[in-house]
Amino acid sequence: MSDQRHQTGNVTVPSTNTLRTIERRERGLALNATAKRYLGALRTGRGLTGLIFLLALVALALLAPVLFPGGYDQQSAQSFAAPSAAHLFGTDELGRDLLVRTLYGLRTDFSIIVVAVPISMILGTALGLVGALSRTASAVIQRLLDIILGFPGVILGICIVMIIGPGWLALVTAIAIGGLPVFGRQARAALLEQNTREYVTAARTLGVDKKTVLVRHILPNAIDPILVNGALFVVAAIFIEAGLSIIGLGIQPPEPSLGSLLNVGMRFIESAPMYILGPTLVLILLSMAFSLLSDALNDSVNRK
Amino acid sequence: MLRYLLSKLPSVLLVLVATSIIAFVLPRLAPGDPASTIAGPDATPEQIGEVRARLGLDQPALAQYFTWLFGVFRGDLGMSYIFNRPVTELIGARIGSTVELALLAAILLIIIGLGLGILGGSVRSRGGRVAVDSVNTLLIAIPAFLVGLLLIVLLGVVWPVLPVSGELSLFENPSLGIQYLILPALALGLSQAPSVARLLQTTMLTTRGEDFVDLAVAKGASPTRVTFRHVFRTSLGASVVAIGLRIGDLFGGAVIVEAIFARNGLGQLAVQAVNMRDYQLLQVLIMGVVLIAVISQLLTEIALSALDPRVRLDA
């Protein structure tokens, strides 16, 4: 193409078709680069470990009804049994298998994460980006986020539990609201950073309207930090579920969740210290998986 | 500096006013009515109405809000419906326990966080770095209440060296009080430390690549001096912010840790207040926690602006 342009004497303007082809190829390349960054993250030691932990836990949670079709309420003769081949994590106060209860608890936790975190991520990011459209709206939203930020996670949870009563919905609401300032501030920071970039100025100069610049140009470039924070926020979400359930304001026993199992296990901690083994182990693996993934993603995104 | 503080004032005031409204409204949105709780299950509607009038609950909400707010300014936080005692007295009886816990936890957080951070930012060998990273990764994945439960199993059940449940005031009996305090405080501090440590580690590693560090090395400064005097000092800013932001979380985490260690602090009081729908008590507790979080955020920003003049100029 370059020899085409530098013909002596006259300047050849590339045809619209050529431009389209170039643009398409560039987009393809850009997508590849994005995919490469994310896949690259998974190829590091941390990313791979996180991914393996996560996939294993997801598989166990999904397969729990197949592996243990009896459900989590089946009782056996022996209560407070220590871990053994028959009961890998032992049994609880009613002789129910703790491995089964932990896996069903993990399902509860996943169901909370899968609903609450994306809601928080999308709403929070949208709130943060509104700043690009209106100065007043931006100021109001930032103050609102400041107020939410003033409430430590558990206290926010307590407030919401008070209104809608303890349970799944309260936890999802608490987590979704608690994440708004995290994503809102992140999106705003990314927005401010991208706003000064040349491609944004270029798009504006070309007369592209504000909304399109925001959605088509800025958002795709701001997605990396949002995903990194998203993975990290899952860890916070897991802690909020477990924390509220432990003080009796989350999932209510006998329904299992990682937190509600710890809530009951805590009462028997001196006589049956192995009770909390299962939920503890799974909770640590789960939060470690997400924090490792977030780390790996962060490293790979910043190295680009 | 003063101008910077003044520029922060409207936003802080706004957050506080909004919080006072939220703290007032939230408990009242909850289903259930303290008047019928107090009057008992067999009370007639007239008796419940009588209780409502006595508590001032029949007044318009706005009037109730201002009565409460003016009371707060006079130092009167109201009467707890359920305990039938002044809120000031209830909180006064418990606040010592929570403050002792949070203070020791904050000290441990700073020591462990900065210690791990300096270690991570100055260790050169690959093995050492992997070790520090692994400790951080593991600690980040374990929340305060889980550290607490594990400490109870380890040091209370398997190898019983410390008391795991109950408390004793530090002022009444310092040597025994600290034994009751050390595990819950460690649980709180340890779980918050890695976020500070990792931030410090990253900043220190970046700072180490700067020219002035090379200069210090070239001038023959000892590795220890380079680490502490040159790298650590200039890298401290971000960690100060991280510590400040953690302080608010410490109080949130304290609610759960108190429940685990059966400490009779403000956290336990809050859980009781939620279960019994004690508006008067709850609104003060919510307000208090947010106030602490806002003040620690503000202090953080002040500390940061003192450390780094660019922050002041930006505002």
Image (cartoon, coloured by chain):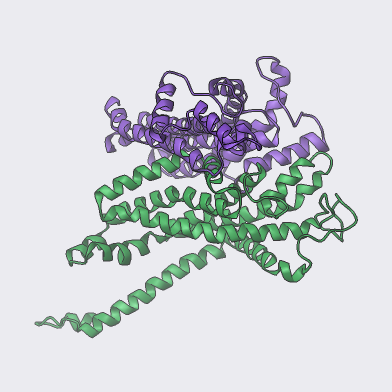
**A93 displayed left or right of A8:** right
Q: Camera-side residue: B270 or B30? A: B30
What residue do we see at 51% from left, 57% from top? Answer: A117
The colour applied to the residues of chain B in this rendering is purple
- Residue furthest out toward the right: A77
Residue B290, horizontal then vertical, whole percent = 47, 34
Q: Camera-side residue: A250 or B314? A: A250
Residue B250, horizontal then vertical, whole percent = 56, 35
Residue A142, horizontal then vertical, whole percent = 35, 45
For the N terminus of chain A, the image quarter is bottom left
Residue B126 visible in the picture: no
Q: Is residue A254 above or below residue A7?
A: above
Name which quarter of the figure residue A124 lies in.
Answer: bottom left
What residue do we see at 43% from left, 68% from top? Answer: A34
What residue do we see at 60% from left, 54% from top? Answer: A168
Q: Is residue A198 above or below residue A10?
A: above
Q: Camera-side residue: B197 or A254? A: A254
Residue B110, horizontal then vertical, whole percent = 55, 31
The colour applied to the residues of chain A in this rendering is green
- All told, the count of numbered labels is 0
